[in-house]
């Protein structure tokens, strides 16, 4: 309570605003409170905003191809919901479930509803920033598609804010519900897989809707189709269509009502009904379980590792860091919640041919494999961050000549523990979903490039595992950039490979690629090996 | 042997350490004292080779911390004030991991881990538990073990008693005096002055980045005419009118 007695609702708005300000300040501060003493703007978030604004500008051009308001809005809100939602999901771990917070806030007179409201608002603001960036240009471009053009910017802005609120409220509601349904012991395991599931659902919605629209002539989606009621972006598109003067049919009216009611219900349900169990779980996360169970080994004991792995990890420092990284990938909730949602992209692209038969005959499978190859870079960026970043000082006072063994230890852990299992999981799916199996040949050049691509991270700054506190936008920007790099890599390698399959010089191309990769690989390895270890200034 | 010559460190305009000159011979156990923000941790971090000095020189066992930081790191053991560990690992995994950073063979590492575990009364099942489930004191025992695992000739302790219970603290004090007797050079940073007074054979007090006192606890007491190290510290680091300030604070609370 900020002052006086407790309000009957448990909501103390001045206190919530104070908490919100502090949460945002902490999450935005780059390296805030670290011994590196750096400070500044959240560059990752700003770059992400710029990137989304450019993407929005490109999508907004749809307004110039005789699209109607509903179709225009459903595409934009589909993207907004996915991009805003996934960002909120990736940040929610630190914002909602920071175990150290129990020591700081647990004993303060803060009602659970006030605490959850403040946390939810910070996620809403994050989601708003990104969805507004995405919708900046389309807000004005969409005037071309609206019956009452003058009203469109205002209505689109308001509906965009409601979409952002819905995305944030959904995430908070799901996590708050999870705290009620599963106990403290199972929470850690459940929460990261729930995150993967939520990302898959959002990505599926985002990918499938444009494909369905693609089949309709003239870029006009019939809003009377019954299945649209299942898609939240359609609810918000309906609301927008009605507000800018489209004729309000009963179905459009129903979906518009769903947008408002569902958003209000989720926000109310999370804050008013589930805040009690949320507070209890947050407190339990900060507890020191005295009778904690013994932890199983991350890998068989180093002396019992299989010969191949042991030979690959002959350097003892590499081996030690390999096991450290494997432990964090399997045991640490924060790392898992950042790492595994990136699998969603792979899984969705692998199963998309089930929804779109034309994809199975094109380069879709090769794109999937290229995304897998980029997983190494995404995962390595994730493994630079940790709640125990202060412990990474040990890399600075241990007698290490450079960061090469640290980098290679993490890289190998990611390949063995994350990339190869993903490849093994996705390959059978691809086999069943694609029709032209000769296209699988085109996967070989992508696979061959994987080890070399995985070295790229080692050339950018000192690679110190688990040494950075996670700040807002850092992970989201990394993931988006990795996806873009993956798409560009796919364009370059798979286009040539597919052409080679078609023209009959595929094997020559592969041989040349292998030679080039061998040279590039050697150069990159040397570059990483000779990087000195800089003392802190 | 540790040798500092006009060692200084600036963070922008702020001078954290202002030209410290100090020699610490082998086998000496030196208590490094100072109020919060005096420059103790900065000095220690420069001695580990992890933080570059702005000016001056520092040598540890003949190796310069700037020119040959690797040689310094090989002979130094460090217990940081943060006591941070990688909590996703078990204690056993963490200690094996630290051993790998110092190129200690795995079999040898296990022998040494067992020895320290017996000393700190950490049994096998406890060693196989995740560090996230450890209490602060138990975690500190692991941090101390990790600093000594490679048998360093120089050991730097920054508030090592954080979280240790009375028995563990007593064991630790016995351990460091034994280590010093065996010829290890030890710097011991702490705010617990009576412990420093009892275990250290030399006390250095830093205030605002400079050395303001250097000698045995007895000599410092004699020089200042004070009855305890706590009073010496209080006098040299300028906490004045303590009673009046406490009364003013209490009054402010009740208003």
Image (cartoon, rainbow, N blue to C red):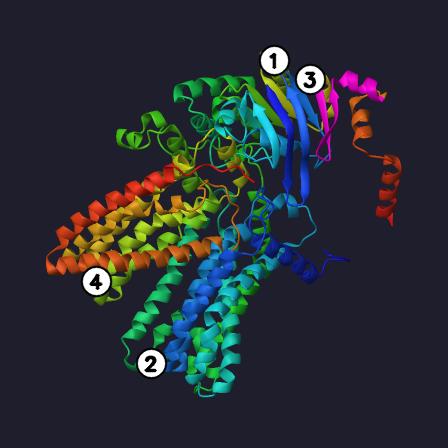
Q: CA distance from mark 4 to mark 3?
A: 75 Å
- First along the sequence among labels 4 and 2: 2
**Judging from the image, what secondary structure is the residue with disc 3 in?**
helix
Q: Residue at x 37, y 62 (%)?
A: A203
- How busy is the neighbourhood of tag 2: few (under 14 within 10 Å), some, or many (20 plus)? some
Q: CA distance from mark 2 to mark 3?
A: 83 Å
Is B218 inside the magenta-drawn segment?
yes
Disc number placed over residue B199 in the picture, else none: 3
Q: Nearer the viewer, residue A101 or A131?
A: A131
What residue would you read off at disc 4? Answer: A360
Q: Are marks 2 and 3 on the same chain?
A: no
Is A238 inside the magenta-drawn segment?
no
Please tell me whether mark 4 or mark 3 is closer to you in this view. 3
Disc number placed over residue B75 in the picture, else none: none
In the rendering, at what x and y percent does residue A369 appear? Answer: 27, 53
Disc number placed over residue A220 in the picture, else none: 2
Q: CA distance from mark 1 to mark 2?
A: 83 Å
Q: Are marks 4 and 2 on the same chain?
A: yes
Chain assignment, label 4: A
In the rendering, at what x and y percent does residue A276 appear? Answer: 60, 53
What residue would you read off at disc 1? Answer: B178
- How busy is the neighbourhood of tag 4: few (under 14 within 10 Å), some, or many (20 plus)? many
Please tell me whether mark 2 or mark 3 is closer to you in this view. 3
Q: Is residue A522 left or right of residue B30?
A: left
């Amino acid at each position: 309570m900020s002052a006086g007695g407790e309000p009957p609702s448990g909501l103390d708005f001045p206190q919530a605003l104070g908490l919100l300000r502090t949460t945002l300040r902490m999450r935005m501060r780059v390296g805030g409170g670290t011994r590196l003493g750096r400070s500044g703007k959240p560059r990752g978030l700003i770059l992400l905003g710029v990137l989304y604004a450019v993407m929005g500008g490109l999508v907004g051009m749809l307004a110039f191809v005789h699209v109607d308001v509903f179709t225009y809005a459903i595409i934009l809100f589909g993207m907004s919901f996915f991009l805003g939602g996934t960002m909120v999901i990736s940040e929610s771990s630190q914002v909602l479930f920071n175990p150290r917070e129990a020591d700081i806030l647990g004993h303060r007179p803060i009602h659970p509803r006030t605490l959850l409201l403040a946390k939810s608002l910070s996620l809403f603001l994050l989601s708003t920033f990104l969805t507004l960036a995405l919708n900046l240009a389309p807000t004005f471009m969409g005037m071309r598609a609206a019956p009452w053009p003058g009203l469109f910017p205002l209505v689109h802005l308001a509906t965009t804010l409601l979409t952002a609120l819905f995305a944030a409220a959904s995430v908070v509601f799901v996590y708050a519900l999870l705290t009620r349904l599963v106990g403290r012991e199972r929470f850690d395991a459940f929460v990261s897989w729930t995150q993967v599931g939520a990302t898959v659902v959002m990505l599926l919605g985002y990918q499938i809707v444009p494909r369905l629209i693609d089949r309709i002539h003239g870029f006009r989606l019939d809003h009377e189709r019954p299945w649209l009621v299942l898609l939240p972006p359609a609810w918000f598109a309906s609301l927008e269509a009605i507000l800018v003067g489209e004729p309000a049919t009963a179905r459009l009216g129903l979906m518009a009502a769903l947008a408002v009611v569902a958003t209000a219900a989720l926000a109310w349900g999370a804050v008013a009904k589930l805040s009690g169990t949320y507070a209890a779980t947050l407190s339990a996360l900060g507890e020191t379980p005295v009778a904690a169970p013994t932890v199983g080994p991350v890998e068989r004991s180093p002396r019992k590792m299989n010969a191949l792995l042991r030979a690959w990890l002959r350097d003892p420092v590499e081996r030690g860091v390999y096991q450290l990284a494997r432990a964090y990938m399997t045991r640490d909730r924060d790392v898992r919640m950042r790492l595994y949602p990136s699998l969603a992209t792979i899984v969705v692209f692998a199963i998309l041919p089930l929804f779109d038969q034309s994809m199975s005959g094109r380069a879709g499978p090769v794109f999937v494999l290229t995304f897998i190859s980029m997983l190494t870079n995404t995962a390595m960026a994730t493994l630079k961050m940790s709640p125990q970043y202060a412990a990474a000082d040990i890399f600075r006072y241990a007698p290490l000549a450079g960061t090469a063994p640290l980098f290679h230890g993490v890289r190998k852990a990611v390949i063995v523990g994350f990339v190869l299992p993903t490849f093994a999981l996705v390959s059978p799916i691809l086999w069943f979903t694609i029709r032209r199996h000769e296209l699988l040949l085109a996967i070989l050049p992508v696979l061959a490039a994987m080890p070399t691509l995985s070295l790229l991270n080692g050339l950018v700054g000192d690679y110190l595992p688990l040494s950075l506190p996670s700040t807002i936008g850092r992970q989201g920007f990394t993931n988006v950039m990795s996806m873009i790099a993956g798409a560009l890599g796919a364009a370059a390698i798979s286009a040539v490979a597919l052409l080679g399959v078609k023209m009959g010089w595929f094997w020559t191309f592969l041989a040349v690629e292998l030679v080039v990769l061998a040279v590039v690989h050697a150069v990159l390895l040397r570059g990483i090996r000779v990087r000195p270890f800089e003392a802190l200034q | 042997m540790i040798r500092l010559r006009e060692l200084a460190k600036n963070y922008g305009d702020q001078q954290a350490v202002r030209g410290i000159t100090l020699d610490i011979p082998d086998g000496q156990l030196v208590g490094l004292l100072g109020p919060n923000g005096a420059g103790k941790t900065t000095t220690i971090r420069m001695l580990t080779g992890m933080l570059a000095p702005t000016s001056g020189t520092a040598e540890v066992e003949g190796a310069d911390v700037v020119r040959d930081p690797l040689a310094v790191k090989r002979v130094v053991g460090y217990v940081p004030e943060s006591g941070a560990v990688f909590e996703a690992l078990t204690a056993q995994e963490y200690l094996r991991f630290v051993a790998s950073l110092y190129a200690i063979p795995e079999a040898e590492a296990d022998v040494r881990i067992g020895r320290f575990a017996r000393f700190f009364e950490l049994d096998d099942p406890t060693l196989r538990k995740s560090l996230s489930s450890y209490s602060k004191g138990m975690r500190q025992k692991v941090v101390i073990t990790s600093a000594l695992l490679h048998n360093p000739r120089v050991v730097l302790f920054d508030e090592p008693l954080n979280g240790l219970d009375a028995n563990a603290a007593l064991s630790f004090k016995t351990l460091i005096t034994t280590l010093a007797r065996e010829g290890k050079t030890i710097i011991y940073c702490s705010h617990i002055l009576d412990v420093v007074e009892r275990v250290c054979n030399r006390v250095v007090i830093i205030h605002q980045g400079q050395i303001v006192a250097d000698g045995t606890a007895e000599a410092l007491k004699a020089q200042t005419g004070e009855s305890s190290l706590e009073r010496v510290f209080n006098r040299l680091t300028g906490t004045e009118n303590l009673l009046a300030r406490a009364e003013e604070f209490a009054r402010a609370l009740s208003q």
